[in-house]
Amino acid sequence: MKLVALGMSSAAAICALMVASPTSAQDIGMSIFNSANSAAINIAGTNAMNAAIAAQYDSDPSPATPQEPYRWGVMKKKHAAPAPSSTAAIDTSPPVALDFRSDASVTRAVNARFTDMLSSLQPDHRDEIAAVLDSGTLQTQFANLLSSYGYSSRNVADVMTAYLIIAWEVVHNEDATVHLDGIGVIHRTLQKTLAHSASMRTLNDAQKQELAETLGNLTMLAAVAKNTLVQRNDAAGLSTLQQGVQTTTERFGVDLKSLRITDQGFMAE
């Protein structure tokens, strides 16, 4: 998913601080994503995300053939760690609302967590980082990005789709939008699975918002960091960022390195 030219926008300003030195440039991936991974894993709603991902993996149990690449489900069973058993239950009740109403107090809590995480890399710039996050423009930029594809930053499935697609683009340093039909397949699967997820049914609006805003911040920082490192021809920094993103998504049960995006969605390499 292509970002518009951001200039010294919120995400770009933060990333400029993070990659201010060669050492920081190489550390940005693991530092940001290992720390943010802990934040995302610990918030309510991660089980719902795992459920959606596990269901995508298991959506097609048919074996692979020379004419048909492994589908995501077959790849999961062969290569990835099994999803936690708590994520397996799919609710057959009426669909869960995936949209949520935002509360400013939730945004403040998410911003405070990211301020702590990012300022651990650049403690002398804590006030600047906090000001950028608290300005709200980072969230606005993410909302505008999703809106350009007809998605909403206040819909959990829309946000998860953007997170997975942009994380894949970072890991592979490729443009997923050449397969817009495939992105649509991934989006529809997430919508359907989350709407019937027992874990998602337990979440209130504040918990949905916390999950979505955490993933939204991760998405923006990953995308802009990748663009910055590519522009600097910083191969070492890009490699570390890619590993950090890969590590994070593996914790959600997704091995992005082994996946490619086609017009049919994710397929195993």
Image (cartoon, rainbow, N blue to C red):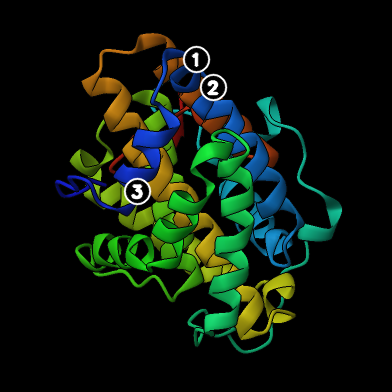
Q: Which type of secondary structure does the marked residue at label 1 adopt? A: helix
Earlier in the chain: of badge 2 and badge 3, it is 3
Residue under numbered circle 1: 23
Image point 63% across, 38% down: which residue? 120
Image point 84% across, 59% down: which residue? 86
Q: Amino acid at mark 1?
A: Thr
Q: Quadrant of residue 255?
A: top right
Q: Position of residue 129 (x, y in %)?
A: 46, 50
Q: Nearer the viewer, residue 206 or 107?
A: 107
Q: Nearer the viewer, residue 170 or 139?
A: 139
Q: CA distance from mark 2 to mark 1?
A: 6 Å
Residue found at the very far right of the displayed protein: 85
Q: Position of residue 19 (x, y in %)?
A: 40, 26
Residue 150 placement, left or right of 221: left
Residue under numbered circle 2: 27
In this view of the protein, can residue 107 be seen by the observer?
yes
Against 112, residue 118 (above or below) is: above
Image point 39% across, 31% down: which residue? 170
Q: Are marks 2 and 1 in contact (CB under 8 Å)?
A: yes
Q: Quadrant of residue 55?
A: bottom right
Q: Position of residue 56 (x, y in %)?
A: 56, 51
Q: Position of residue 139 (x, y in %)?
A: 38, 65
How many circles with numbers are drawn on the protein?
A: 3
Q: Which type of secondary structure does the marked residue at label 2 adopt? A: helix
Dot 2 crowding, Cα within 10 Å, few <14, some 14–19, many 20+: many
Residue under numbered circle 3: 11
Question: In the rendered view of the protein, which quadrant contains the C terminus?
Answer: top left
Q: Nearer the viewer, residue 6 or 242?
A: 6
Q: Nearer the viewer, mark 2 or mark 1?
A: 1
